Amino acid sequence: MSQKTSSKCWWRYRASEDNGRIRLGDPGLRPELRRRARSYTCVLVVSILTIWGALSIFYGAVFLRSSLANNINIHVIDLDHGFIGANVTRMVLDIHATPSTPVWLAKTDIQSLDQAKAWVRDHGWGALVINSGASDRYHKTLSSGGEYNASDAMTLVESSGRMVIAGMLFVQPAMVAAAGQVSQRFAAQQVANYKSAQPQEQTNLLVLLRPISYTTVDVAPEAFLLAPIMTAFGFLACLLSAVGVMIMWKLTSFSFFIQVRFRDLTLMWLALILGMALILSLYLSLAFLAFRGPKYNSAALTYTPATFFKIWFTGFAVVLALSLWLFAWFLNLPPIFVTLPSVFTVVPNIISCISTFELAPTVYRFMYATPFFNGTRIVQYIVSGAYPTLGRNIGVLVGEIVVMGIALAGSVWLRQVLALRGISDPQGWFRSSMYFQSPIPYYKIDEESTVPRSTKRPNHLLSTENTLSVGRDPLAIEDDIRISDCNMDSTDQTIGNLGV
């Protein structure tokens, strides 16, 4: 019984600890509770709008991709210029086009299979190639009865390294379906022609029943299991790791903005972010080495020490550009909005990696400029050699780093001005907020009503001994109780305190 009573003692009133405290239902606390309720409701509304906006952006980019697959073009290339080439080309182009399948087009300026492979690797999604001499081999074997390989008739040339997910969902299935459909139709056509003509004893029936088939060649292979998510989640892990560090920097650097010169602050933040991006991207490249590795997929390009450093510095450029961008926002946003730039930066960047713009509404073409997209294109080229656009991708990343660096310098200047004028507090709340607690007096208050913190404590801030105070405005007294959310410090308007 005594044990049961002692376990509930912590609910009871204890004079030594509760003396001077008030109940939550105290009438004097009700105005403060109403203010808190309005503030927390505002936070909830912002969170709901953030979720709605982020999901709308993401779902809007992918929900129409099945009906926009006809924006992808696959080509049929006739190198045979004979009976099989003409019939297969016609059958492929006659395939009924739907919004959910890529469009077939004829390409006539290719003269060899090697040239077709090079064109697909550098510019195309894929091609069905009718190989040179297919008709001659078929007619010769059909009448002579020699050995015949139907797979020599066609070659499906694909490039999985251009965009892994789009290739898996639309390009590869469309090419295989077209090749299979054409093979069956051509075989049925030849059997019908054989029945209508006078049969010959020397006809090779095996060749007649299976006249054409195909082989598949991936000229830029990136079909290993990690390919669809490798860059997207690698860059995301680095960026989320950087976000926590940068928020900590923002919350613990108020005294620097009071005492340190603007140019030194700018150089300090640039150096810190550069070093952080370099370290995080190093582990990104190490993770790729561990889970992809030189021998993980023998079909891809050989993994060399140069590959490691290329992926490292590509990740460095991506993380650096986005870290500069986000920290420029973090410095001057109040806590209620600090997650917004992260969410609305991460979502478009992730979409640009897992989707292709041919499969998204036109409004999403702006994501060609996202660091994730350009970094992914560079890594895909490093790994597979597909769709080389290095000049454009590197140029975009370098330009973004320069622009974001300038934006960060402007944000540092603004943060320092707001801090020194008593407009923004250490947490980032502005003067209009109920949570505002700045150790710097507001610059528009008359000198006689402003007492430096080093000589007298303003009555609108709470001491560590008394957590309740009256009135936030030092010139006005209210009847209700207000609660402060930060501890006092000894920061002076002129000398500052690096211990903040």
Image (cartoon, rainbow, N blue to C red):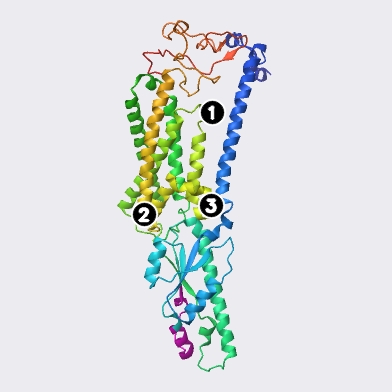
Q: Amino acid under label 1?
A: Ile
Q: Amino acid under label 3?
A: Ala
Real-space CA distance between mark 2 and mark 1, rounded to the nearest whole angstrom: 41 Å
Mark count = 3
Instruction: Say if 458 sits above or below 74 in the image.
Output: above
Secondary structure under badge 1?
helix
Q: What is the chief secondary structure element of the magenta stretch?
A: helix
Instruction: Say if 313 sits above or below 417 in the image.
Output: below
Residue 139 is covered by the magenta coloring: yes
Real-space CA distance between mark 1 and mark 3, rounded to the nearest whole angstrom: 32 Å
- Which residue is at the front of the view, 231 or 265? 265
Q: Which residue is labeled 1 in the image?
A: 336
Secondary structure under badge 3?
loop
The residue range painted magenta reads 136-154
Q: Which residue is labeled 3 in the image?
A: 360
Q: Which residue is labeled 2 in the image?
A: 382
Badge 2, how many Cα within 10 Å: few under 14, some, many 20+? many
Front label number (1 vs 3): 3
Instruction: Say if 428 sits above or below 19 in the image.
Output: below
Instruction: Return the residue found at the far right.
Output: 1
Q: Position of residue 50 (x, y in %)?
A: 57, 36
The residue under the point 39% across, 30% down is: 410
